[in-house]
Amino acid sequence: RMGLDEVLRSAKDFSPSLTVVDTSTPSISNDVNIAVEIKKNTGSFVVLVGTHPSALPVETLKINESVDAVVRREYEHTVLELATLIKSGTVNREGLSRVDGLTFRWGGDISANKDRTLSEDLDSLPFVSDIYRRHLDYRDYFYAHSRYPIITLITGRGCPHHCVYCLYPQTFNGHKLRYRSIKNVVDEIEYCLNNFPDLKEIMFEDDTLTVNKKRAIEFAEEILRRGLKFQWSANSRADVDLETMKALKKAGARLFCVGIESGDQRVLDSMKKRLTVSQIRKFFADAKKTGILIHGCFLVGNPGETKETLQRTLELALELNPDTAQFFPIMIYPGTEAYNWARENKYLTTEDFNEWLTSEGLHNCVISRPGLSNYELVEFCDTARKKFYMRPSYIVKKFIQGLSNPNELKRLSKGAVTLSKHILKGSLRNKKAGNC
């Protein structure tokens, strides 16, 4: 965790020829400011990457003239090609114009090169866990729903679904599924288990690990074949069948993070979720049979949302009773269908991205429409958290979970501290309207 001064000292010591800054929409102004300061102190070529410049490349470059370029969509190969160009000493308009996926500034002009084809050969990429080992302390990162310490991996990229709010398929990785080989993934798992001896869990951050049943079962079988003993969690959908869940549980699956989003079918349909409420109920029943825990994600404020549909969502959350749950207003990101819907209907409360985060680093709700204001969405989420987590039956269940497993007790204790602060401060903070 480095402050700006420490970042700049480190940059000066390293003296890079190329600086790559990952970005997001809520942090874009700060990201640009850091990039500009690094350029001032090192003279390096500065390029921004991530979902925000992928969605708004020209607008991002116009924030500050010191930023040299942005990369659209996935950036490993584009950045490598750019680094090779810089190392060769031929950084000019002609050279930059040959780097696919790059939008760059030269003189007073901004030029956009053709898109880069998304890589199909994910096995050619180095293990991200080797970067963790050399450059990051994975103990600095905590997921409330996961055992600590944890690291994250991916087994593939892309998502075939078209949920209107989902950022990465629409702006970054695309909808086509591209996979690492099972051997390559499990090789990296072995690397992690050998190099991080205190590791308690691996989180697979694929958009949806379970979307391909055949591959999911092959993944489980390879873990078992190698005799690997570890617990893991993954992003999933509420349409995984019982057979797949049984296979994954046997291979160490502890928890699925699942986007339930709404308890109202019309809202699910308007989100293009391609799920039914009855499917969600069956999924939870099957998960209970296998012993896989569920972290339920509920996203409110979508097209078609009303006060009545909000209530149905809360009722479903209490009925399903996932191990943990999160309730948040929809975050409208540039490049998504949901952002276009909100902008076209003038539902955005601000287009200043600096206002998309609170001073505490929490999301602001920036969507407000007739019959359902941003304050009402935030108030619902605040109320839903209290009603979900403050149930006596839930508290007793968590207490028993903690007593049965020391590692679970540590996770619950750490998560409870964060949650209690959020719940106790929520009502006061939300009077400012829009904070969540």
Image: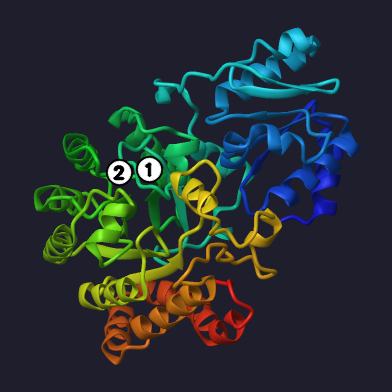
The amino acid beneath tag 2 is Leu
Residue 367 x %, y %:
53, 62
Residue 379 x %, y %:
48, 79
Residue 77 x %, y %:
56, 21
The residue lying toward the viewer, choosing from 349 and 81, is: 349
**Residue at x-position 67% and y-position 52%:** 27
Q: Is residue 230 visible?
A: no
Q: Residues within 10 Å of mark 2 (few under 14, many from 20)?
A: many
How many angstroms separate mark 1 from mark 2 (CA)? 5 Å
User: Which quadrant: the C terminus?
Assistant: bottom right
Q: Is residue 125 visible?
A: yes
The residue lying toward the viewer, choosing from 223 and 109, is: 109
Q: Which mark is residue 380?
A: none
Asked if residue 100 lies left or right of residue 255, the reply is right
The residue lying toward the viewer, choosing from 378 and 87, is: 378
Asked if residue 424 lies left or right of residue 181, the reply is right
The amino acid beneath tag 1 is Asp
- Element marked by disc 1: loop
Residue 148 x %, y %:
45, 63
Return the residue at label 1.
206
**Residue at x-position 63% and y-position 54%:** 26
- Element marked by disc 2: loop
Return the residue at label 2.
209
Would you place residue 173 above or below residue 195 in this image? above
Q: How is the image coloured?
A: rainbow
Residue 86, quarter of picture: top right
Would you place residue 419 above or below residue 74 in this image? below
